């Protein structure tokens, strides 16, 4: 799990973010900065609605649609990504370090963990030469401690 982010980490992340924007020909606008900042400031893997609520404290006039589009843009340029398997409501992650997710199917909580062997799982032979694999993720689902305590009592 992520510790409280150090100032230096944030600076490094911002440099990566600015580079990705520049490489993709995107301007580093206040909106993009605010959305990105909100995203890397939490490890709750927020939905667009939740990011919107955070960003609105700084930029009152920003719309949910803008936040949503900005999040998708960040995912496109590789500054963030969408968490897999979260159903209807997209959840976003600004942590680009290798890590995996556990998701509680009951309360929807997503918890980061890092298990090194999961970083380099093999691609099945039958896919070789047919598909270009760009991202491999291991994703676990089940009940968190709180929810399993409730369902077993
Ligand atoms: Zn739960
Ligand atoms: Zn994560």
Image (spheres, rainbow, N blue to C red):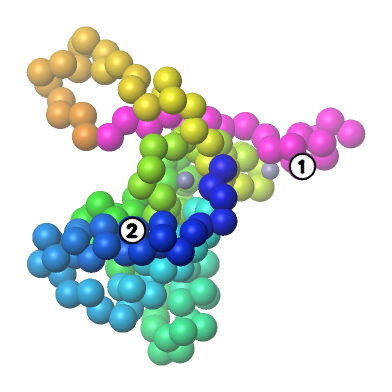
**SS class of the residue under badge 1?**
helix
Residue 79 figure quarter: bottom left
Q: Could you tell me residue 153's position as x and y percent?
A: 89, 34
Q: Nearer the viewer, residue 142 or 14?
A: 14
Density class for disc 2 (Cα within 10 Å; few <14, some 14-19, many ≥20) is few
Residue behind label 1 places its C-beta within 8 angstroms of ligand 1: yes
Which residue: 76% across, 42% down?
A: 146
Check if residue 111 falls in the magenta segment.
Answer: no
Left or right: residue 148 versus residue 116 is right
Instruction: Please report the residue visible at 34 percent of the width from the left and 58 percent of the height from the top.
Output: 13
Let me know if residue 71 appears in the view: no
Few, some or many residues within 10 Å of mark 1 (<14, 14–19, 20+) = few
* Residue 99 visible in the picture: yes
Marks 2,1: beta carbons within 8 A:
no
Residue 144 is one of the magenta-drawn residues? yes
**Gap between marks 2 and 1, in whole Å?**
35 Å
Which contiguous range is marked in magenta? 135-153
**Depicted 119 relative to depicted 70: above or below:** above
Element type at marker 2?
helix
| Residue at 84% from the left image edge and 31% from the top image edge | 152
| Residue, far bottom | 61
> Which quarter of the picture shows residue 40?
bottom left
In the rendered image, residue 8, in percent from the top left (x then y), is placed at 41, 60
Disc with the residue nearer the chain's start (2 vs 1) = 2
Rendered residue at 20%/17% (across/down): 127
**Residue behind mark 1:** 146
Tell me if residue 90 comes above or below residue 27 in the rendering. Answer: above
Is 55 positioned to the left or the right of 130 in the image?
right
> Which numbered tag is attached to residue 84?
none
The residue to which callout 2 is attached is 12
Q: Nearer the viewer, residue 4 or 129?
A: 4
């Amino acid at each position: 799990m992520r510790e409280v982010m150090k100032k230096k980490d944030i600076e490094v992340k911002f440099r990566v973010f600015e580079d990705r924007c520049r490489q993709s020909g995107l301007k580093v606008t206040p909106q993009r900065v605010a959305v990105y900042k909100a995203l890397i400031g939490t490890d709750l893997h927020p939905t667009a609605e939740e990011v919107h609520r955070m960003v609105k404290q700084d930029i009152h006039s920003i719309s949910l649609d803008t936040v949503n589009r900005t999040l998708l843009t960040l995912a496109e340029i590789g500054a963030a990504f969408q968490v897999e398997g979260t159903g209807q409501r997209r959840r976003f992650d600004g942590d680009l370090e290798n890590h995996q997710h556990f998701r509680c199917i009951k309360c929807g909580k997503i918890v980061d963990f890092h298990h090194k062997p999961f970083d380099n799982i093999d691609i099945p032979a039958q896919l070789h030469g047919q598909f270009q694999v760009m991202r491999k993720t291991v994703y676990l689902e089940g009940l968190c401690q709180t929810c399993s305590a409730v369902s077993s009592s």
